[in-house]
Image: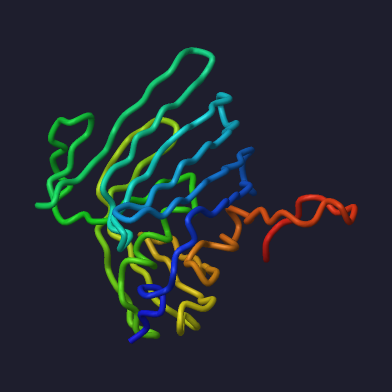
């Protein structure tokens, strides 16, 4: 069994960023670990049919179990937002109103962000080659729809003592092999996102992409 992530010390805050490959978009995230909760404050700039900014806060407990998402979308036409949460008994709520059809969902998956792949990777104990099926609340940005989706994760390699690893992600007909760093954050999402890695600008370098 691989549980190297569980006992690793957490940095108080971590800056992450990804750029989209197939549409115009960028995300900047600050992940902060407190004594009782982990929070991720994100800002996305998306340019599909409309130009939009999406500001959100994701909250998990210290085992990376989802608690709450608050999100605000800003467009030229105005602003729209929502909150999504789950209680200790597994009941889901949107804007504090019961959300039916989400029974059994534990994790959340935001369609425009590699960040939420980290939740099951950090929350679960892994055995190489053994698939784990998950029911998740799938959230679409920027339209803010929520629906239950079945996903499967499999540890392909690595992960010992919290090291780098490769996980296979599957949902419906879609499949991708995701490399993650020692903290369980995606470093490359084939065909969709590149991780942004800052370098020393004093040496004349600029922002570079992560492994791709």
List x then y, in percent, for residue 123: 32, 66
Q: Is residue 178 above or below residue 109?
A: below
Point out the image quarter for the C terminus. Answer: bottom right
Q: Is residue 76 above or below residue 16?
A: above
Q: Is residue 120 left or right of residue 52?
A: left
- Residue closest to the eye, 123 or 21: 123
* Residue drawn at point x = 23 percent, y = 41 percent: 85
* Residue drawn at point x = 90 percent, y = 52 percent: 204
* Residue drawn at point x = 46 percent, y = 77 percent: 162
Point out the image quarter for the N terminus. Answer: bottom left
- Residue closest to the eye, 30 or 140: 30
Q: Is residue 34 left or right of residue 204?
A: left
Q: Is residue 198 left or right of residue 158?
A: right
- When asked about the image quadrant of residue 5, the answer is bottom left
List x then y, in percent, for residue 63: 30, 63
Outermost residue, left direction? 89
Outermost residue, top direction? 77
Q: Is residue 194 left or right of residue 93?
A: right
Q: Is residue 151 above or below residue 182?
A: above
* Residue drawn at point x = 45 percent, y = 51 percent: 32
Identify the coloring.
rainbow
Outermost residue, front direction? 35
Q: Is residue 47 above or below residue 195?
A: above
List x then y, in percent, for residue 178: 52, 67
- When asked about the image quadrant of residue 80, the answer is top left
List x then y, in percent, for residue 10: 45, 64
- Count of labels shown? 0
């Amino acid at each position: 069994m691989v549980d190297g992530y569980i006992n690793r010390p957490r940095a108080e805050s971590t800056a992450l960023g990804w750029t989209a490959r197939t549409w115009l978009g960028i995300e900047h995230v600050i992940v902060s670990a407190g004594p009782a909760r982990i929070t991720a404050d994100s800002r996305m700039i998306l340019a599909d049919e409309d130009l939009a900014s999406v500001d959100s806060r994701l909250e998990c407990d210290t085992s990376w179990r989802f608690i709450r998402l608050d999100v605000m979308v800003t467009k030229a036409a105005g602003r729209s937002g929502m909150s999504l949460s789950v209680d200790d008994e597994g009941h889901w709520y949107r804007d504090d109103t019961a959300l039916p059809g989400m029974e059994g969902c534990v994790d959340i998956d935001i369609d425009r962000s590699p960040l939420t792949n980290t939740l099951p990777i950090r929350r679960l104990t892994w055995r190489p080659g053994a698939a784990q099926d998950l029911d998740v609340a799938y959230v679409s940005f920027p339209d803010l729809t929520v629906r239950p989706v079945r996903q499967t994760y499999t540890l392909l390699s690595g992960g010992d003592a919290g090291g780098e690893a490769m996980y296979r992600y599957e949902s419906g007909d879609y499949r991708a092999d995701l490399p993650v760093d020692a903290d369980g954050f995606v470093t490359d999402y084939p065909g969709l996102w590149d991780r942004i890695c800052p370098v020393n600008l004093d040496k004349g370098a600029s922002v570079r992409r992560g492994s791709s």
